[in-house]
Image (spheres, helix red, strand yellow):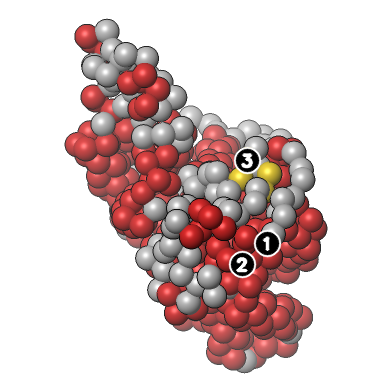
Amino acid sequence: MNLRILLSSLQPVGGSVLTNGVVVAIVILLHIQIATYITGSSTLAIVSEAISMARKDERHGRLAYMMVKSQVQIFAFGSATAILFVLFLLTGLWAIFWTALQQITFWVMVFEAAFFLVEIVLLYSIYANWERLGNHRRARLGMMVLLNITLWWQMFLIDVVASFMLTPNAGDVSILNQILNPTALPLTIHRTIGNLAWAGAVIAVIGAFNYLRLTRHSRVPTPDAPAGLRPLRSIGAMAVGHLETEAKRAEILHWEWVAQWGVIWAVALSLLQPWVGYSYAKEIQLHAYGAWYTLMFGSLSNVFLIQIFLLGMIFILGSLFFWRRMVRSGAPGAGRQLALMVALILLTLLAIQPAWFAGSYADAVAAGGNHPWWQGGLLNPIGNFIPFKVAALIGMVIFGLWSVTSYATALSRGHIVPGGSSRGAQRTALILGVTVSLMMMVMGVLREHSRQPYTINGEITLHQQITNNAPSSSSVDQGQP
């Protein structure tokens, strides 16, 4: 099949920036947040269920059930957004693109749909029979593993389609070459890690929200904290004569632990993203240079700095959460954690330096500012990717890893006191969850807008988000894009 011959007979689709752009973006970004949580939390649920079985830890058993239950609660709405996106928005607004893409990736989408049906059967079977399978936990764990595998392959097939849209290899529509697309593997690795980080962030938000809800009217000292600490809004005894019930105290302790568990996953997995992101960007550079140039030098170059800023904020907020917990618990190494947070702030400020004070490199040159700012130009060499941004990102990963491992060491040695939290730390966990969500949105905008004005890069063009005709037959004969 020749992609350009297929497109040559199709007609334009009407629309506006609002209908063809904003509405599509809102629906798909909402769906992605739900779908990635379901995929990532299915993995974390397996981890918690396995720990619960091995250590008889009911906290993890309760957390595993909570994640499965949450998946069921949001599954219907997430599926509805996907159906709305496919049946109404793509078919009605981007019909040329969607018709061509369906014909090209037909079998990929068929298998994706099959995995979707398997996902429904497994997810609802696990949830509906959770208690019944309590005496057969290995079988239940096995079903959870099957669900996780199904979700991963479903994500992989979607990544095949997304990769073809960005790097179609001059319109090569071979199914094998679609699967072996050069950007498919880096994208899948990137999303696999991102799913876990996002699921951890959502868990942190749930834990923090419930902690704040239960401690809303309590201003109390922590009973297990070392003497000399100031009273804090926490989970210990309430004002004289108003002791918390043991049940409520246990409940608050549980949500404090849930928030901590989620923050560790969110921060630790995000540490891998700079390396994976660089690998992904390198494949884009090699196989879709125009999109890469737009990201690094063009109209999205400064937007890309927002992505780096949000990544740095994840590490900073994680370190802040760890530091507050360590201080409240009187754990050794709290001073080092504070120093790591300061280092992360400085490295983030270095990493987000713009390479030019203009919308793009071309704008800076056109304005006659093709020399450093200290010579009156618009360029900022301190913001160059090599060596400054690379060094800053490496430093962020090193100090972020040091921050996580320092806290994990204190936790494993019993230096983090159960109940030694504060409402401020939980608010930090809430902000961390919002930051991860924003980073996912910005990442999606960068990837999708990098190939504009194309939907399938180099093949189907857009103008003001309105699909245009394919190239004329004469241009096809001349081999022009």
Q: Amino acid at mark 3?
A: His
**In the picture provided, is 27 more to the left or to the right than 414?**
right
Q: Which residue is mark 2?
A: 6
- Label 2 residue SS: helix
Q: Which mark is residue 9?
A: 1
Q: List the single residue furthest toward the top.
A: 376
- Name which residue lies at 73% across and 62% down: 86
Q: Is residue 456 above or below residue 111?
A: above
What amino acid type is highlighted by mark number 2? Leu
Circles 3 and 2: CB atoms closer than 8 Å: no
Quarter of the figure with residue 315: top left
At x 21%, y 37%, the residue is 386
Residue hosting label 3: 463
As measured in the structure, the alpha-carbon distance from the residue carrying label 2 to the one carrying label 1 is 7 Å
Name the residue nearer the viewer: 234 or 29. 29
Across and down, in percent, residue 2 comes to 53, 70
Q: Are marks 2 and 1 in contact (CB under 8 Å)?
A: yes
Which label's residue is closer to the chain start, 3 or 1? Answer: 1
Disc 1 crowd rating (10 Å Cα; few below 14, some 14-19, many 20+) is few
Tell me the quarter of the picture where residue 212 sits: top right
Question: In terms of sequence position, does the residue under pointer 3 or pointer 2 come before the other?
Answer: 2
Q: Residues within 10 Å of mark 3 (few under 14, many from 20)?
A: few
| Closer to us: 240 or 353 | 353
| Residue mark closest to the camera, 3 vs 1 | 1
Residue that appears at 48% across and 30% down: 230
